[in-house]
Structures are given as C-alpha cells and as structure tokens.
Image (cartoon, helix red, strand yellow):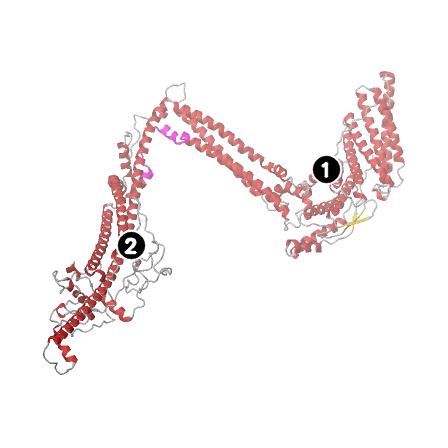
Amino acid sequence: MVQSPMLSCPLKQTNEIDWIQPLKDYIRQTYGEDPERYTQECATLNRLRQDMRGAGKDSATGRDLLYRYYGQLELLDLRFPVDENHIKISFTWYDAFTHKPTSQYSLAYEKASIIFNISAVLSCHAANQNRAEDAGLKTAYHSFQASAGMFTYINENFLHAPSTDLNRDTVKTLIHVTLAQAQEVFLEKQVADSKKPGFLAKLAGQAAYLYSQAAETMQDFVSKNVFDKAWSIVVQAKAAHLGSIASYFQAVAEAESGSHGVAIARLQMADKQTIAALGFAKSFPSSAPVTSNLTAEAGSNLVDLIKHNQSKVQATLATLTKDNDFIYHQPVPNEAGLAAVSKLPAAKAIPVSELYQGQDIQRIIGPDIFQKLVPMSVTETASLYDEEKAKLVRAETEKVETANGEMAASLDYLKLPGSLNILKGGTDQEVTVDEEFRRWCSELAGHKPFHRAFDDLQEGKAEVLAQLDQCSKQLDLEESVCEKMRSKYGADWTQQPSSRLNTTLRGDVRTYRDTVNEASASDSQLSATLRQYEGDFDEMRSAGETEEADVLFQRAMIKSGSKHGKGKGGGASPAEGSLLDDVYDEGSMSVAEQISKVEEILKKLNLVKRERSQVLKDLKDKVSALLSPYPHHCKSHPAAQVHNDDISNVLILNKKSITGQESQLFEAELEKFRPHQNRLLQANHKQSSLMKELTKTYGDLLQDKRVRSEQSKYETITRQRNTVMARYKKVYEAFNGLSSGIVQARTFYKEMGENVESLRKNVETFINNRRSEGAQLLSQIEREKASGVSEQDDREREKLRQLMERLSTEPKPSSTSPSTGSAAAPSKIKSPPSSIQTPSYSATGPSPKMSPRYPPPMPGAPPHGVPPSHSPAPYGQYMGAGPSVPYVPGQPFQQGAAAPLSEGYNPMAYPYQTPVSPPPNQQFFSQTPAPYGGYSGASPPSTTAAAPPPSHYMASQGYIPPPPPPRPQQTTYPPSGGGPYPSGPGGYAQSRPYGHHRTPSQSQSQHSSATNDPWAGLNAWK
C-alpha cells in the first residue's frame, strides 16, 4: 500500500557574517581580558555558522549542525548582548516562502531563524521516512511533534516577526500541519495493528480536525503567494479523506453494537467525504512544484489512497444496507441528525526545554565554547543555588546532632551502658583507685614541707618592719633636734619645721606598715590552711612517693563507712555471687535475659546512629560533588551533567522567564536530595521508638527485687566513693592554693623589702640635707653673736677712756700713734686666736656616704654639762674635707677644723654658704609630687608656681625612690606592679641636683661638710 504524502517546510537561507572581530572587541572592552586568548573560541563559533548554512534539509548531519549552533547561541546570549547597542552584527535571512531578504542586528532574529530551520529540517526528516518500517514510523512521529514544538517556541517567544515566514499565523498554520501529520502517522500505526474501530475513529477524527484548521488558515496565504497551491490541495484532500476514515470506523463500531441504521447513515457520509477528497486530489498538478517539497508521485499516491478508502466504504455500505433491508429493518437517520465523531489527540508539540534535555542533544551541542567567560548573572544565580544546598546540609546536620544529643542525654540519664556492667558483675567488685586521685598523690610526692617557707616569710616581714621602725626613729630624732634648736635660739633659728617637710615620708612609712599588717592577716590564713590540712598533705605525699595511692584510697573508703573496700587483688566474695546467677521464678524473665534484651536495644540504637551519620556523610558528599561555580559549564563531565541537567537548561533556554522565580526553581532542583532527607527522618523516628522501648525495658529491670537490692549496695559504694573524692579534691585544691599563696607572699615581701630600702635611702638623704642646712644656720648665728660682743666691748672701752680723760688731772701726753695706744688697751679683751687660719677644701676628697643611722658622738665632744653657749664648738670636728679627726688639745689646729672653746670662736672655721630654708608654702625638696605612679623622675617641674630660691642640697645621683606600697588582699598576694617609680616620697630622688647655680667653691664646701655629722655635738644639749 502506498504511503500518504507528507508536507515539509522549506528552509530559510542566509548570508555569511563575521563573528570573530565583534566578539574580540567586546571581550576587550567589557571583560577586560586579552581577546587573543579567545581566538579559537571565536573561530569555532564562526565556523559553526558557516557549516549551518550548508546543512541539508533531509539529513541527520544538517539537523545536528542546526542543533549545535542554536545551543551555542543560547550560551552565547548569557555573555554577549548582541544587539544594535552592544555587539552590532547584521543578520540577513531570506523568507522561506517569499524569498525576500530581511536584516536585523538582533540575536533573537538569528535564533528565531535557526529554530525555523530546525523545524523545517525536522519536518523534512519526518516526511521522508519509510513508515512501512517501525523505526521509520517512530522517527516520523517524533520528528513531526518536535517540529511542532519548535514552531510553538517561535510563536511564544518572538512576538514581532520581521518576515512572513515568522508571522504568527504562518507559524500557527505550520503547527497545525505538523501535528495533523503526526496524528496521521500514529493512526497508520494503529490501523496496522488492527485496533478497535471506535478507537481508530477517534484518532482519525482528531487528524481530520487538525487538517481542516490548517486548511482554513492556509487559504489566505495561498492567495498572497505565501504557501504553494499544492499545499492547500493536499491539506483539503486529507481533511476530507481522514473525515471519511473517521466516519467509516465509527460506522463499523456502531454496526458491531447493533445500530445498523446509524452505521448505514455514517457510511453514506463517509462516501460523500471520499468523493470530496477525491475531487481535491484530482486537482493536484501533474507535476509537483519544486517549492512545495513534495515528490513527483505525491498527487497520484494521494488519489490512490483516497480511492482505496472509497472502495472500502462503498463495499461496507452495500453489505450493511442489504443486511438491514432483509434482517434488521432499522431506520436510517438523516446525516444532520448524526452525532459528531469523538476526537482523541495522540500528538502534541514537544517543548524545546524537554527536547534539549535529551542526552543526545546535549552530546550534539557539546561543551560551552566560551565557558571560561562567566557572566555575572549566571554566577549569582549559581551561588544562590549553592547557598540553598548549603542551607539544606546545615539543617540536616543540625537535626542529626540534635538526635545524637537526645540519645546521649537519655542514655546518660539511665546510666547506660555502664550500669549494665555493674548489674552483670554484681556490686561486690574490687574497689579500684580513681586515676585522678592517683594523679593528685603523684603531684604531692617529693614536695617539701611548708614550715621552712613560712619561716622565710616571717623573716622577710620582720626585716621590713625593722627598717620601717628605723626610718620612723630617724625622722623623730631629726624633728626633735630641730625643735630644740628653735627653742634655744628663738627667732634666729629660721630653718623650716621638720613636720612640714617629712609628711610624705611619714605617710609612706605608715602606709607600708599598714600594708605589711594586712599581709600578716593573709599569712595567718595560709597558716590556718596548713594546720588544717597538714596531715592530709603528708598522707598524700607519702602515698605518692611510695606508689601506694590505692592503699590510701581504700583506707579512706573503709574509714568513710564502706564495707566493700578490698586490698590490692581483692575479688568478689564467693558468698555474694553475681546477679546473673539469680533465677527465682521460671515464669518471669531472669535478670540475665532482661540485661540481654537491654543490650540488644542498645546495639540497635548504635546501629541507627551509625546509619544516620553515614547518610549525612553521603548527603554532604553528593552536595560537594555537585557544587560548581559555573552551573552551565562542562556538560561533558558526568558530575556536571548530574548537577547541570535542569539548572543549566533553564538558564539557557528560559533566562528571562525565570526572573523572580528562583526560589521555585531551587525547590524543584533540591528534590534530588529528598531520598537522603527521608532516610534521615526515618532514622530519627526509629530512634524515638527504640528509646521508648529501652526506657520501659530498663525500668522493668530496675524494678526487679533482685536488682533493687544490689542497686542499693552499689549506690552506697558510689556515695562513699564520691565522698572520698570530694574530700581529697578539697585537700588537693588547698595544696595548690597554699603553694600559690606562698609564692605570691614571697614575691610580695621581696618587692616590699626593695620599696622599704628605697624609702630608707630617701629618709637618710632628707636627714643629711637637714643637718647640713642646720650646721650652716648655726655657724651664721654664732658669727653674728661674736661680732655683736666685740663691738659692745669697743664702745665700753671708748666710754671708759673718755671718762678717764675727763676725770684725769694729768696733762695730756704728747700725741702718739693712735694705733699704739689703742692696740694695747683691748688686749685684755677675749678675741679669736690669730693662729687660726681660714680652712681650705680640697675638691678631690671622697664622696659623701649616706649613713643609715646617726653617728655616735666623736672623741673630744664636750660633756653634758657644757653651757648652751658653747654648743657650736663640736661642729668643728665635722668640717674637714677628709675623714673626721677628733680634736686633741695641745695639737696644732688641722686645716678646716674649728677653734676650741678656750681659744675663742672663729667664724671662719665654718666656711659654709648661708643656707636658706624653703618658704613656708614649700613642703618638698623637689618638684611638686604627683600621685604615685603617675610620673617618672625625669618629669619637668611645674611652671605655674613661683620658682623657689636655689637650694644647696644634693640628692643621690641615680637613685630611684620607691613606689607606693601595694595592699594585698586577705587571701592572696598580688604581684607588685612593675611600673616606673615616681620621684619618691617628698620628691627627694631627682635626676639633677638642686644647687645648679652654685659656684665651685660652694659645691666643694658642701661636699666636704656632708662627710661628717654636724649634729653629733647636740647630744649633750639634748
């Protein structure tokens, strides 16, 4: 039997274009990359278009070339905007029917033309198949539907057609034709398979309907010379022909059901439709036009096909009419009263997205040519999808961790599986030492007793207090001497009161003493701790040294009331036995059976946990394998195909349509992980049921009277063990606290000793300065007194001489030298000896040494009964530049020594500069002190206060005064701050001397006078 002729769409033709240069320019301008790196890619795309132009309309190779070029255009559109404003390329295509050229700069026009040619090639491929074979018939059926799908895609996505062949009505007509031919092919297959007449009637009715729709729209285009007239003839003939076939099979079905009259009416209708179809077929040209894509035998084949159907209809009609006339006598209804034949669609347009999901098409398209160029939009979409997968993994991980935590918490609450070991072995087991207790004993081993450390602390504290007492005594003595001199000389003693100047030093002494007293309280607490735990320390130290911690532990267990403590190697008492040996009633489960059941449930729980962890690991591995920074790249790789099968195609073919619908797309894609999620959910449900069963079974086990008695014994031992561990933990912590406290106390007393030593040096410097000032003041007072007595004697002698002259009756002798007479008269007056020379001071004498205490009276000092007026005499023994040499009567006066009292008072024996005490508002011998720790010794003096007069006191060079004393807490000794010391109490330690305006002689005299103690002679006066 001949095949029904099929229509196929002609292809569009195009001119050659150049892709290479425009793409390179855009890569350089937009992506900022070297376009030469993409020379091969640009050339590949250009070659694809050239190959596509020569694709044959009825060859698999031509179809594949069109498929690949279109797929690469979709990928290209993700990276390169080809239009009039960006990459400007003129695409010229000729109309498939009118052959008129149309040019546009839009890539959409290029893609629509390619899709049109794909549809045309598919229709040609289907029309030329040998449908007598099953493979050819299936290929034709699929290709017609794919062609209809491509035409549908054009109508849905390209609204403004620039040419007639892409017009919506034109494309719609082509869709009807291709679907009708697909339906006809399917009908041929069902007829060949001898399906039921009713089913075949519905298929034929749908095909006739599609052909009739195509015929209606095609008439207008035929008049416009768009479609060839032969197309219209074929469509109209097939519409009537398939209508006749539908009526024929419906008549056969009705005859079989007993409706002979209706069957005859339908056959009469089928005969009329056959006549109409035959009329259209006979009008077909003798030779098919070239533009119609029909074979030369198309007209004759169509006529033969219709005639064959006509003869079959007429024969059946004659048979049924005869049977009805002789047998059934059923009335034959009018044609208008017949119901329309039902239609059953068997062909549909295959969507482009579904078509491109096929692995064959993916293989044909190949990898993305420009896969190295990643558009930002695709990257963002891919990253959003990757984040959704990461969220899924995090959520499932959290669920697994929660389930594992619930299991662990439940087992810990039930004390499983540890309590099972106790129940299986009985509670009468060896009491072993805790490893933590053994570690405590080993740490105490070899540690020396604390008594020696406490003795060292007491010695350090005593030394600090002794130095503080010495500083207080020195300040008291200096202040007492100053006030006694003030009471003796009255207003002539202009030295500043000591109480105004030593306030800071006394405050530091008091603060240090208070700090040490507070530290003593902490020392007492440490001593109390030692007395409380000393015995325990010794026990643990001994146990650690002899490695008998277990003996001490068991002894402590026995002492706390445990009757189960055993020595090393002790075992279970044979009288007690094990719970597994207790079997009371045969009707109830034994303890061993109950324990075995609990263990079985525990094994199942562990199995569930392992399975859940493995499923989670598989899920993570799958997500990691599918993660890709470029979701549309590398489709040839298997993993990439798994990941990119849906996402990439949506991005390629529906880039604009998915905008704002990413969440729905992601949800659909994440469904591939649903099996893993379901397995994790099932594992959690299984765990819940097993935990309920375990709780009930273990509860029943614990309620067993055999277990309860043993459990009571075990709990008693556990309580005793916890008591022992708590006690020795407290001892261990006390040991650590005591060791730490002693270390801190040692550090404290060491730093306190350094601070007090600095304070002592400051006190000595202060006292030495005060003594030097007092000595100079005292020398000045004595010189003033001696000068006043000499003048008074001269006036008295002059008055006496004048009185004697008035009373003398003797005549005046001849004038003599006034110097002779006057020189002898005052010879009786006591005057300083002329032999005393003004002492000179060597600048190379030894530097002064600071003495921590006042020096004792030197030999030659006056006894306690010397009158107050003779008190300055002893100062002479401290005036030498060298070491002090006591005065011995009868020896010549040493240079720099004061004259003895018997020879009179010589002011020149005291070559000191007149000292000047600070004004009353100045209480320091240095810069104005800031709060402790707030400045260093080299800070500049304040410029806001009036500058004091130049001082003649020299502070120790390079000496650093102490910081404020630390105040320890009651329980621990904080380490002393290591910040820089301030200038010291009262500011006595300076980086430069105060007397920077003095002359060298002044410096030398003060240097020599500081060697000895000018106040030692005041002991007698005191």
Height in image: 719 above or below 774? above
Residue 18, x across and y down, in percent? 73, 54
Under circle 2, the secondary element is: helix
Residue 699, x across and y down, in percent? 41, 25
Q: Write the start and end of the magenta stretch as one range.
A: 413-437
* Label disc, if present, on residue 860 of the rendered structure: none
Q: 67 or 170, which lies in front?
A: 170
Residue 585, x across and y down, in percent? 38, 19
Mark nearer the N terminus (1 vs 2) = 1
- Residue on which the image places disc 2: 504
Q: 873 or 897, which lies in front?
A: 873
Residue 872, x across and y down, in percent? 17, 65
| Residue 907, picture quadrant | bottom left
Q: Residue at x 34, y 26 (%)?
A: 712
**What's the amino acid at mark 1?**
Ile
The mark closer to the camera, 1 or 2, is 2
- Residue on which the image places disc 1: 350
Give neighbour class at mark 2: few <14, some 14-19, many 20+ (Cα, 10 Å).
some
